[in-house]
């Protein structure tokens, strides 16, 4: 058994070494960096990727907290969710814990998506409104047409 494993391992290592392609000696970097790729993607793909990362990335942590909360709510005692020596939960309990965890992670991902969409929308609105031209229209119609210097009730000169 050990000899067979050794031969298979030796074969894979030898195949890797003998058929590997040589790396080029000159540094010709023709591939685009990750920032260039991200700038060329539409915003919805970046939002979808971020939602996916947050949803799946939070799954282990949410599952641990869900297991602790479930054991407290159902059994009235806190059990160690990482203890494999004893079977604390039935199969039905485990499926419920996984379902609750998946639902909570989905809610976290969608909440983050909504917050990032609202932030982007408000940022775009601020940028769009920042460069509007402001026109000063006098409220008194009999004021002189020269807007460089006006005499209005107590103001000796004002520059518009």
Image: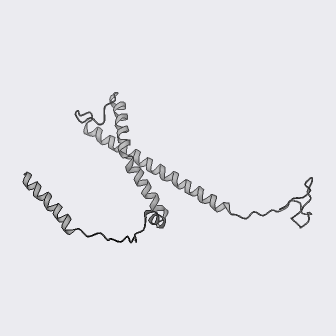
Q: Residue furthest top?
A: 76
Left or right of residue 2: residue 136: right
- The mark tally for this picture is 0
Estimate the x, y position of residue 47 in percent, counting from the top left: 46, 58
Q: Residue at x 48, y 53 (%)?
A: 113
From what the image shows, is residue 93 above or below residue 8? Answer: above
The answer to which image quadrant residue 123 occupies is bottom right
Residue at the far front in the pictured view: 25
Q: How is the image coloured?
A: one colour
Q: 133 or 139, which lies in front?
A: 133
State the residue in front, 77 or 5.
5
Depth check: give the residue in front, 15 or 151. 15
Q: Is residue 116 left or right of residue 30?
A: right
- Position of 110 relative to 66 (above/below): below
Q: Quadrant of the C terminus?
A: bottom right
Query: In which quadrant of the rendered view does residue 84 lie?
Result: top left
Residue 22's x, y, as percent? 26, 70
Image coordinates for residue 99, horizontal then vertical, percent = 34, 44
Residue 38 in the image: state x and y as whole percent: 46, 63
Q: Is residue 34 visible?
A: yes
Which residue: 10% across, 58% down? Answer: 7
- Name the residue located 35 percent from the left edge and 39 percent from the top edge: 64
């Amino acid at each position: 058994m050990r000899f067979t494993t050794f031969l298979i391992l030796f074969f894979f290592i030898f195949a890797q070494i003998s058929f590997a392609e040589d790396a080029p000696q000159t540094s010709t970097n023709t591939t685009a960096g990750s920032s260039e790729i991200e700038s060329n993607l539409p915003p919805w793909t970046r939002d979808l990727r971020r939602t996916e990362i947050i949803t799946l990335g939070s799954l282990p942590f949410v599952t641990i907290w869900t297991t602790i909360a479930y054991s407290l709510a159902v059994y009235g005692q806190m059990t160690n969710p990482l203890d494999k020596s004893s079977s604390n939960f039935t199969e039905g309990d485990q499926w419920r814990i996984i379902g609750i965890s998946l639902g909570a992670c989905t809610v976290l991902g969608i909440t983050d998506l909504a917050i990032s969409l609202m932030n982007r929308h408000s940022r775009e609105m601020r940028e769009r409104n920042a460069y509007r031209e402001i026109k000063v229209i006098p409220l008194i119609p009999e004021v002189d047409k020269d807007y460089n210097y006006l005499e209005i009730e107590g103001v000796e000169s004002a520059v518009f």
